[in-house]
Amino acid sequence: MGHRPLASVCRAAAVLVMASWLAVPVGAQGSKVPRTAWGKPDLSGVWDFRTITPLERPAELGNKEFLTEEEAAKAEQDVIERNRRLNERPAERTTAGGNVDFREDGSPGFYNNFWLDGGTKPVGTRRTSLVIDPPSGRLPALTPAAQRRAEERRAYLREHPADSAQDRSASDRCLVGFNAGPPLTPGGYNQNLQISLTKDHVALVTEMIHTARIVPLDGRPALPPQIRQWSGASRGHWEGDTLAIETANFNQQRGWRGATGSMRLIERLTRIDADTLEYKYTVIDPETWTSPWTAAIPLRRSELPMYEYACHEGNYSMTNILSGQRAAEKEATTKR
């Protein structure tokens, strides 16, 4: 992998540009939620979305919706102990390997544990999953069409893992960060979101790959359906003290969790207090899932700056993947 998971010492240029957008907070007597000069909750700032809470509830937890305080403390201590154990183990030579889950052993073939930063805490609510609907805490079943697409994709990649860069994922190609959304999906590293707010726009910049969404709040019409974008086209509006953002027009090639370009996303951001921003989103794609589903992530305010994530500049993985596949093909041809 050639991406740079460890933040550099310089801020990203995009973040510096966005700094001038910051809303002017106005202290409200007796209120824990700061407000802008025009009276809306101030969502501005850098927000941390790391968590060890999984997207889906582990099957072994059954109908258990929340962890107890003791269980949450044990889960946190288990991660701290795991990180200590992995950081202290003897060095190993890196070898080619398959995908390794971020919360598994970080074995050679993937980044070792030093480079990963998935956090140590469950979400503050102690929910057993980020998915809050369906009540099972698990994603709805895939449609038969989605199952066929997934099977066809796996079969294709077995024979054509890297004919060209277009066979690789959008994150491999440094087009969209794998945790950057929309919607945000905790995992890996660089798990920060900067929000800047004006009366007419909100800007959301993710630290990974610096995906910047400029979302109009002025009621302008949606883009025509033929215009497709990697992060979709977003329009926002206020629902009381909650900012709602509706996004459509996704590029079909993005393939987020197997979704189609017809996916619709509804995000809601609500500032709970000075240090907490609730991020809730609903995914609607009847071509992929048998019903809509909703997840919620409490974001924590961070005093740290956003840092550079030089994905394209350091993306040696794409060169290595393609050249490695050409070498494998040459070797197979020679053997035949």
Image (tube, rainbow, N blue to C red):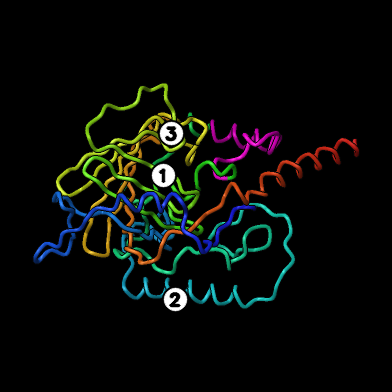
Taking the magenta stretch, the answer to whether it contains residue 272 is no
Which contiguous range is marked in magenta? 149-171
Q: What element does badge 3 sit on?
A: loop
Residue flagged by tag 1: what amino acid is it?
Answer: Ala
Q: Residue 71, how many percent across, how many down?
A: 37, 72
Left or right of 313? Residue 270 is left
The residue located at (30%, 37%) in the rendering is: 246
Foreground pick, 123 / 214: 214
Q: Nearer the viewer, mark 1 or mark 3?
A: 1
Foreground pick, 130 / 134: 130
Circle 3 Cα neighbour tier, 10 Å, few/some/many (<14 / 14–19 / ≥20): many
> Which residue matches tag 3?
288
Foreground pick, 252 / 30: 30
> Which residue matches tag 1?
212
Q: Residue 320, how many percent across, how many down?
A: 72, 47
| Residue at mark 1 to residue at mark 3: CA–CA distance | 26 Å
Residue furthest left in the image: 29
